[in-house]
Amino acid sequence: MIDCKITGMGWLTAPAGKYSVISKYRQVSTCQLEITIDYKDLTSHPSEGKYLSMAPLRILSFDIECAGRKGIFPEAEHDPVIQIANVVSKAGDSVPFVRNVFTVKSCAPIVGSEIFSYEDEGEMLRKWKDFIVQVDPDVIIGYNIANFDLPYLLNRAVALGVKDFPYFSRLKSSKQEIKDSVFSSRAYGTRENKVVNIEGRMQLDLLQFIQREYKLRSYTLNAVSSHFLGEQKEDVHHSIITVLQNGDSQTRRRLAVYCLKDAYLPLRLAEKLMCLVNYTEMARVTGVPFSFLLSRGQQIKVISQLFRKCLDLNIVIPNLKSEGVNEEYEGATVIEPKRGYYDVPIATLDFASLYPSIMMAHNLCYTTLLNKQTIERLHLEKDKDYTLTPTGECFVKPELRKGILPTILAELLSARKQAKKDLKAETDPFKKQVLNGRQLALKISANSVYGFTGATIGKLPCLAISSSVTSFGRQMIEKTKQTVLEKYSIKNGFPFDSEVIYGDTDSVMVKFGYDNIETCMKLGEEAAAFVSTKFQNPIKLEFEKVYFPYLLINKKRYAGLFWTNPKKFDKMDTKGIETVRRDNCRLVQNVITKVLELILEDRDVTGAEEFVKKTIADLLQNRVDLSQLVITKALSRQDYAGKQAHVELAERMRKRDAGSAPTLGDRVAYVIIKTAGDKNYEKSEDPLFVLENSLPIDTKYYLENQLANPLIRIFEPILGERRAKELLNGSHTRTVTVAAAKTGGLMKFARKANTCKNCKATIKQGETLCKNCKSQSGELYGRELAKMNSLEVKFSKLWTECQRCQGSLHQEVLCSNKDCPIFYMRKKCQKDVVKQAEELKKWDATTW
Amino acid sequence: MITDSMFRNVSVQPENYSRKDDFSLPDSKRTYTHQFNTIYTQRVKQLKSRIFKMATAKWKDETINDIKTTYVSKILDVKNLTPCYIIGTVFADYKYKTNVLKEVSTNMYGVPESASSLKAKKDAQEEIKDIDVLRSSAYSDPSSDKLMIEDESGRILLDGELLDSTVLVTGVMVGLLGMEVEPGVFTIVDIVYPEAGEQVERTIEEKQNDKVLFLSGLKFTYGENVDNVSVAQLLKEYLMGELSFSDEDIKLLKSITNIIILGNSTDVSLASSTNVKEKDKYREQNKSVFDADSMRQFDEFLSQLLKTIPVTILPGDSDPAETSLPKQPLHKSLFMKSSQFTNFQRASNPCWLDIDESRLLCTSGENIDDIYKYMVPNLAVELGDSTELESSIQNEVLYKSRLKLLEGTMKWQHILPTAPDTLWCYPFENDDPFALKETPHVYAVGNQPKFETSCLKLDRKNGEEVAVRIIAVPEFCKTHEGVLLDMESLECSVMKIGL
C-alpha cells in the first residue's frame, strides 16, 4: 500500500484500458465487478476536493437472540440461535432501507419490517448467509458482535453441521474462522478479542469503538444508548427469552421487536457518534487500513506515516528489535497549585499543540540527532549548527538538515488548519462532519508522534527525543510563569500583582486580580501574544478561556465556569472530580454535581451547604432511592489476592442461584448493608435481594466512605477546615432511625405489642391511638395519608412510564434493565405502598 | 324564620342497590404486585364486544372506493390500502405528559412541580390568567402530538380529518373505519363507540318537584383566604331558610331533599402557613392535605346543614383522601360532629347514588380535568396571534365549553380512560370498575369552571336510545354557584349566592 501511496478508505482510479473485467463465470468473489490490473497502474487520490466525499457504503447492523438454558449463559454447543434481526442502511441516509428478522418458528408481523420464519435453525442460518451475500454490505456493525454474535453464529453452525454457512465474505472460497487476538497498548490496556475474517467487508463493533473512545460508567447497550441517545431501552433478561420463544407467534413477535431494536440501535449510535466518518478520516490521514483503527494501537499510525514520508525522501528505516527496556524519563511539570476558591476571573494560557510545536521548533528527529563524535567530526558549532536540549542531547539545526518528524508534523498541522478553514466555509452538514472528523484525526495524529518516540516497547523508541521534548516543555512553562509575573505587577504600573495559581503540561492559569471578565480576557490575550514573542516559531501561546469562579482543589482536580465571551458562560468544566468517576455510587455524582452548580453557577454557598445537609439527613433516614446507592464493579478475574466486595458477592449469589449470578466480565452491582461483621467485603449485597428482604442499608458507610471525602475536598477551600467538617456532623445527622432486624436470635423471643401510633403507649389490639391522642386523630391520619399518597403517585408514575417505554398498554412489563434509574425505585415502591396501605387500613379498624 | 319549622320532603334512598360498592376497594389486603396492563386487558374484555356490535351494525355493508370493508381482528393484520375497521385502545403520545424518567434522571423527582413556562411568565411580570394556569400542566403540543390505536398485537398511528373534531385520549376504546394509506398510518373516516350499557327503568311518580343540590369546590381554608368560608356560611344560612323571605324561596328550599358535595371541600394549598419548623427541617416532608382548623370549620358547617338536610360527600383532589382513584370515602375521624348524624353519607369518588329511583353517577372532576389536559396545548406552545387552533375540537374545549369532554366519557362508556396513564389509580386485576356496565340517568361532574348541562342520547344496538342528563357543576368558591336538579324532569338550574 505504501509503495503505491494508497491510503485506507481513499479513492482509487483504475485507468481505462489498463484493466480487464473478469467474466461472471470465472469470478472468485461475489462482488458486483471483478477486474484484474497491475497494481502499479492504479492511481491513488489524496483526500481533497471531490475525493473528500465518503463512499456510499452499505452498512448492515445485526443482533442475534439465543435461547439459553436456565441459569447458564448461552453456549453455542448447546443453545440455539432463535432470531437474527438485520437493519441495512446507506452511509449518510437517515432511514434504513432494509429491516428484517429471521426467526425460528412462526412470528407475527411487525409494521415496517419483514419476517422470515423457518422451522429449522440450520435452515435459518443458511438463509441468513444467503441474505448477507445478496445484500452485500460493505460494513458490518453491531454491539459486541466481534466477541459474541459472530463467533456464536459460526460455532453454532459447526455444532449443527451447517457446512456451507461460514462463507459470507466477498471471496467465495474463503471460509470464515475465529481467531483469538491479544492486543495490548499503553493507552487502552490489554484486551483479548476474537477476530473473524470477513474478506471485503469491514467490521465495526460499536462496543469496542465506544470502549476505546469514551469513558463511561457502564458499557452495556442500555447505558450507552441512554448516555448518547438519551433513551432508556427495554431489557429482556436472557432467562425470559426462552420462555418467549416457547410461547406462540405473538410472544415471539415481542422478542423480534426487541431484537430489531437492538439491531437498529448500533446503527443510530454509529450515526450519532459519527464513528464511520471519523475513522474514515483517520484512516485517510494516517494511511492505515480501516480495521487497524480498532484492532491496533497508536504506534501503527505513526509508523505508517513515517514509512510514507521516508519513501518520499528515500530513507530506509532500520528494523529494530524492540528491547523492552524500562527507562523512565521526567514527564511534564505541574506548577504547584495554590488551592482555594477564586471569586475573580482566572485566565488560562495554553500552548497550542505544545509537543508537536517543540519538535518542529527545535528540529527534533531521528535523523537530526547528533552524537559527540559527529559534532567533532564535522566541527559543528553550538547554537549555530545544532541545538543543545536541556537534557543534554544535540540536534542539528533545520538549515543543515530538516528532520522527518518535524516535516510530518508541519504537514499535519497545516492540513488541520486547512481542514478547520474548510469546515468554517462548508455548508453541507454531511461534508461538515467529514471535515470535522478530518481535523480531529489530524490533531490526534500530531499528538501521538511524541508518544511514539517515548514508547519504550515500541518499534522505534528514541528517548533522546521524547525527554528533550518534555524538558523543553517544562522550561517553557516556567518561563511563561516568570514572564507573566514580571510584566503584570504593581511595579509595572498595574493595580495588582498577578499570580500564577496553577499550571499543567501545556497551560498556565493566571490571576490578574481584576474582577471584571472583559479586562481579564483582554489582558489574557495581550499576555499570550507577549509571551509568544519570547519563543521560537512555531511555538505559540494562546489565550483560550477564563474560569470564573474557579475552585482549585488539587493537582488535576478543579472546577469552574468556562467563559470564552464576556457575556455568557459556555459550560461548567470539571476535572478529576467525582462527577464522572465510575467507582462511586450515583448519589455522590449527583450531590457533587448539584453542589458545584449551586456554588459556581448560583454563587449560593449557603444553599449548597443546606443542600448537602438535607441530602445527608435523607441518606441517614433511608429516604435516598436505592438506585442512587448502587456501586458497580467489573468482575474481571477470579484470583484477586485480597477479598473484594463485588467478588465475594458474586460468589454468594452463585450459591443462591447460579442462573442470575454475574459471570466473569459482567459488572456486579451491589450496595453496602449493615451486617454483624464489619468487613466491607462481607457487607456487599445484591440490590434486588436487599429490596426483597428489607435489609438495612449501611448509611454510615455511604456517608463516611463515599460522600465525606469529595465533599470535604470541595468545601474545605471555601469554608475552611472546621466548618467543612461540620457539614458531616451537624444536627442534621442526629435523627438516625434504625430499621430493626426482622430476624435474629433475640427477636424470636420478643412479642410485639400494639402501641399508639403517636405516643407509643401500649394499647389494646385493634386500636390505633391511645385515649389521649384520639383528639389529634385527624392530624395524625393526615400524615399517614400524605405518605400513602406520595407512594401511590410514585407507584403509578413509575409503572406507567415503563409501559410507555415498552410501547404497549396491554402487555406486561418484562424489562430488567438495571442501568435504568427507575428500575430499583419501582421495585421498592411496590413494596412500600403495600406496607403503607396496611398501615392506613388500621385506621379504619379503630373504634372512634 | 325558624329552622325547626321547616318541613322537607324525604327522598327514597335504598340502603342497598346494585352499584353501591362498584368503587370500593377490596377489604382484604391490597396488593400492588400486578402491573397496570391488567386494567387495560379488563377494559378490552368489557368493551370490545360492545364496540364490535355497534361497528358491524354500522359498517357491515359500508364500502370505500367501491371496496367492501371488512373487520380486521388484529391491528397488525391491517393491510395497506385495504379499507377495514379495527377495534382498539387509543394511546396518546404527547410531548408534555409527565415523564418520571426525566424527573429521576435529572434529579428532579419530588421537587414541587412549578411549571417552568408559568414561572417564566411570572418572572416577566406578565399577567397570569386562569387559562394560563390550566395550560401550564396540559400535555398537548399540536405540532408533535401522536395518536395511536393499539391492541394486544401492536400499534398503528392515526390520521384523518375526523380527529380534529373528535375527543380521543389515552385509554379510550373505540372502533375505527378507514385504511392504511401510508405504511404504519391508519387514516380514519368514521368512528363508533361501545354500545351504551342498559339503563334502569325509572318509574316516574308524583315527585312534588323534589330537588337535589349539587355543590363542589367549597374549599374551606383557614388562613388569609377566609372569603371561601364566609360565602359558604351565607350559603348555609340561605339553605336553612334564615335569609329567605318570599314564599317562593321557601318552597324551593323545602323541595331540596339532598345535598351532594362533589369534592374539594377543603384546600390547604391556599393557606400560606407552610413554614417548616427548625426541628422538622430534616424530617421527611410529605405534603399533608390535612389542616385541622379548616376541617373543623367544615365539620361545623356540615353538622348544621345535617340538622335538616341529608348530605352526601365525595372526596376530591384537595381533600384529605388518597390520591389514587377510586378515592375511598373521607375518613370518619375527620368529621367528629357530622359523623353523629345518620343522614350523613360519606361516598367514594366516583360513586353511584340511587335517589328516588334515579341512578346518579358522580365524580369530583379529576377525570374531566385530566382529559382537558390532552385537549389543550401546553403553555410552552406558542398559540400565535390568531388564537384559533387548527383543530376545531381543541378550539371549542379551550375557549368555549367542556361539555364535549363530559359527553365523551359517556360515549366511551368509560369515565376514567386516562387512568392509569396520567391519572393515578389502583392497579385492579380482575375488573375495570370505571368501564360502565350501566348507563346512569344523571352524570354529574364537580369542580368545573362553569355550569353547563346537556341531555345526551346514546345508541343501543337495536335502535333504542338511552338519555343521560349531563351536568358540569361549577366550583363554588369561584362562582358562588350550585346546581339544582329536578328529580322528576331531570332539568337543572343554577342557584347563585350573591354577596
Image: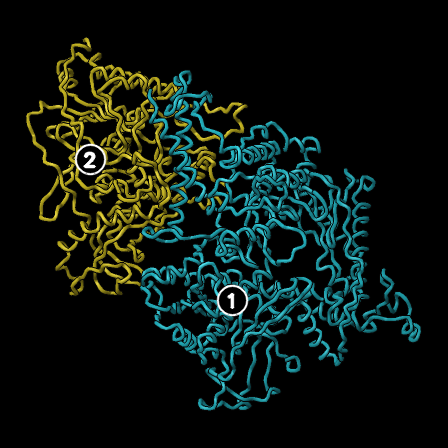
Chain colours: A cyan, B yellow
Which residue is located at x 78 percent, y 57 percent? A331
- Considering the image in quadrants, where does the C terminus of chain A appear? top left
Quick one: SS at disc 1? Answer: helix
Disc 2 is placed on an element classified as: loop
Q: Is residue A401 above or below residue A792?
A: below
Which residue corresponds to the image point at 29% horizontal and 61% vertical from the top-left? B76
Percent x, y for residue A500? Answer: 76, 45
Closer to the camera in the image, A226 or A755 = A755
Q: Chain of mark 2?
A: B
Q: Nearer the viewer, residue A791 or A648?
A: A648
Q: Determine the residue located farthest toward the top in the rendered image.
A: B2
Residue B481 point in image, percent of width and height: 25, 25
Q: Is residue A791 above or below residue A155?
A: above
Q: Do tags 2 and 1 sit on the same chain? A: no
- Give the x, y percent position of residue B134: 35, 36
Q: Amino acid at mark 1?
A: Phe
Picture layout, residue B17 above or below residue A687: above
Say what amino acid the circle numbered 2 marks.
Arg
Left or right position of B184 against A735: left
What residue is pinned by disc 1?
A: A148
Residue B384 showing in the rendered view: no
Circle 2 crowding by C-alpha within 10 Å: few under 14, some 14–19, many from 20: some
Q: Quadrant of residue A470?
A: bottom right
Q: Which residue is mark 2?
A: B19
- Where residue B439 appears, x then y in whole percent? 17, 39
